[in-house]
Image: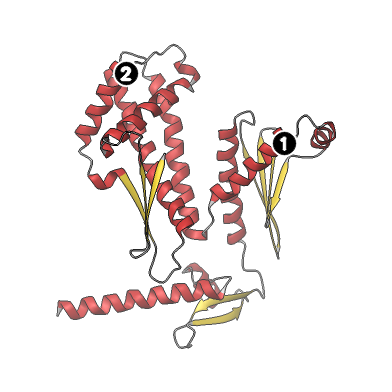
Amino acid sequence: MIKYIVNEEDRTVTAKFISNKDKDTDRDIWLEYIVDGIYKAVAETKECSNVFLTDKVVYPRVKKFLERAKLSNEFYCSIAKCNKIDTFDVTKGKYLAKKRLLKKYYKILNDVLLSLVYDINIPTSIPFKVCEDSVKKVNDILDEIHFFKKYGIMLDDYIAKVQEKEALSKNNMNNNNYAQKQEKEKKQLVFDSIKIEVKDSVVKVTVYDEYGEYVSEVTCDDSDLDSVIRATKKAIIHVVENMKGSWPKYNSLYYTPHFTNSDLVRARNWIDCTFDRNLKKNNLVFRTKEEAVAVAKKMLETISAQKRGQRNGQ
């Protein structure tokens, strides 16, 4: 379970694991979560079917690992801080803080699993098989954090809607008309400008905008919901990156920071000239005026900070 601490004055959201035991320290709580993670990872790995772990074996080794790592108190929580020029959004803050906390957790879980290779007399291929999944999760979370910071899109919101669709399907399985309809139609979810389809072990994501449609397909194990969710997230990331990369087209209206204008922004039509391409190369081409203004303000803040530093250094 994750607890969120919101500080509106500091514009921060802190995420940390919590336990039902009031006297547990942060390290004790992480000890419990990591041990549970080890048992779960081993149980879900086919190659580990003949491996039997006990608390007597696992707990001392995880505890020793955490003590040896000498992790600071700050490590056991993750913080998302809102920039001064942005609007403080608690939901987005919770999302980012949670992702950062889980990234730490799976990284430590992977390190502990690797340490078990040398401490427990089992074939080395088994822990490495278990580690593979935790490494993938760390990389997936890093992709999600990067995607969120770049586009402001919380993938969990999209995936929650996919799960709602799945739940609706299960609740209506006894309805013959509904079941027949589901057999004839592709399983899909349409919301905003994104369509998600899961068929024949492939997740297909289609994003629409005023210029057309963009498609990405990622393979998955459609009998495993976690695999479908991971593939869906990857497909969304890929398709939105492709969509952003293909814009702007000829004569598209775009916005760029412009400091001689009172509103700090300038609107132009894309004609694919050297000037346009240089702006895009430096990430200064935006679809909306608000995006361009936000970047212009950040640039001015950076310049002001540098000037203050130079004055203080004299």
191 and 5: which is toward the camera: 5
Disc 1 marks a residue whose amino acid type is: Ser
Q: In which quarter of the view is residue 241 placed?
A: bottom right
Report the residue marked by disc 1.
Answer: 169
Q: x and y percent of residue 172 in the render?
A: 75, 34
Q: Can residue 209 be seen here?
A: yes
Question: Residue 282, relative to residue 307: is it above or below?
Answer: above
Q: Is residue 133 left or right of residue 63?
A: right
Q: Can residue 129 be seen here?
A: no
Query: Considering the numbered disc 1 on the image, is that residue within a helix, a strand or a loop?
Result: helix
Question: Residue 59, relative to residue 141: is it above or below?
Answer: above
Query: Considering the numbered disc 2 on the image, is that residue within a helix, a strand or a loop?
Result: helix
- Picture disc at residue 102: none
241 and 55: which is toward the camera: 55
Report the residue marked by disc 2.
Answer: 55
Q: In which quarter of the view is residue 224 placed?
A: top right
Q: CA distance from mark 1 to mark 2?
A: 40 Å
Image quarter hosting the C terminus: bottom left
Q: x and y percent of residue 162 in the render?
A: 64, 43
Residue furthest out toward the left: 314
Residue in the picture at 20% in, 38% down: 70
Residue in the picture at 45% in, 58% down: 90
Disc 2 marks a residue whose amino acid type is: Asp
Q: Earlier in the sequence, mark 1 or mark 2?
A: 2
Q: x and y percent of residue 186 in the render?
A: 77, 40
Q: x and y percent of residue 27 in the render?
A: 26, 36
224 and 221: which is toward the camera: 224
Residue in the picture at 35% in, 42% down: 104
Mark 1, Cα crowd under 10 Å, few <14 / some 14-19 / many 20+, is some
Residue in the picture at 70% in, 33% down: 170
